[in-house]
Image (cartoon, grey):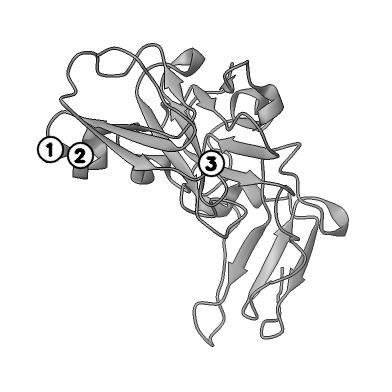
Amino acid sequence: MNSFKCGTHVSIQFCDDEDSCHKEEFAESAAGDSESQRMGEKNLHSFAILTPYDPSKRIAATVFDGDYCNGWSHVVWIEEGKDTSGDAYANVGESLPSLGNDKIESVMMPEEGDFWMDLWDGDQFELDAGYDWLDIERRYKSITVDDGSSNGCVRLGTVRGITSLIFGKGFKGPDFTSDIPDNCCRLFREYNYEDTMKTEGYLPKDLCLDSNDSTSFDFTSGSYSSWFENTKSYICGSNVSPSF
């Protein structure tokens, strides 16, 4: 078996044996209406599991480690009742172990609907701080259904090293000025509380108290280094007072 094509109302999982079907690191999977003309493990899968798929309730896309939606594949989900995948794929290496980090090269989106996916070269939906932010075209990609070919396949082009992603439908992203936790301050890279996800690949960043005591954050190193000299505005919850 070297290729496959699924109907609208069925998703599929391939594995080498019955035991490996329950271990995502050894299995390939794909959503309804998906296909691959060249599978990741050719002629080695001996088991397949078909699952009913209702795209009106639980939406899925399929990511591939090869160009043109070929190679090893894995489903990414929007859970029923949600508008995005949330933080489920904040680290692709952990959430999609069969692919691992740095592997995604193409995505098969649902063929119809207002769906989008944002992909970053760093985990936690941020750019990898080890590279120059000016090289954005190789480090962050925002795609929609309209970017796909006739079968819904979207090629990521020059973007490599994907480590986190968000899959969503409808309005892109929440209102970042609301629902701020009482013990947190939210930092923005633009004035007037604007996020820069579309232009630089950054989401607003929350800084939160660990306890009732003061909590310090060093912007010159570690996971907060990308915010050094880049914070333009902020909003704080009711139980925290900031000092920069």
Q: Which label belongs to residue 21?
A: 2
Please give the name of the residue rendered at 67% of the width and 45% of the height, measured from the top-left corner: 202
SS at mark 3? Answer: strand
SS at mark 2? Answer: helix
Kind of residue indicated by mark 2? Cys
Position of 104 relative to 127 (above/below): above
Whether residue 46 sits left or right of residue 195 in the image: it is: left
Mark yes or no: residue 69 visible: yes
Residue found at the very far right of the displayed protein: 192
Kind of residue indicated by mark 3? Leu
Residue 141 x/y as whole percent: 63, 30
* Circles 3 and 2 in contact, beta carbons < 8 Å: no
Residue 94 x/y as whole percent: 34, 45
Please give the name of the residue rendered at 42% of the width and 41% of the height, measured from the top-left corner: 92
Whether residue 175 sits left or right of residue 49 in the image: it is: right
- Camera-side residue of 18 and 228: 18
* Circles 1 and 2 in contact, beta carbons < 8 Å: yes
Q: Nearer the viewer, mark 3 or mark 1?
A: 1
Instruction: Give how far apart the Cα atoms at labels 1 and 2 are.
Output: 5 Å
Q: Which residue is mark 1?
A: 18
- Camera-side residue of 94 and 15: 15
Instruction: Give how far apart the Cα atoms at labels 3 and 1 are.
Output: 30 Å
Residue 180 x/y as whole percent: 68, 72
Please give the name of the residue rendered at 65% of the width and 81% of the height, measured from the top-left corner: 182
Kind of residue indicated by mark 1? Glu
Q: Which residue is mark 3?
A: 165
How many dots with numbers? Answer: 3
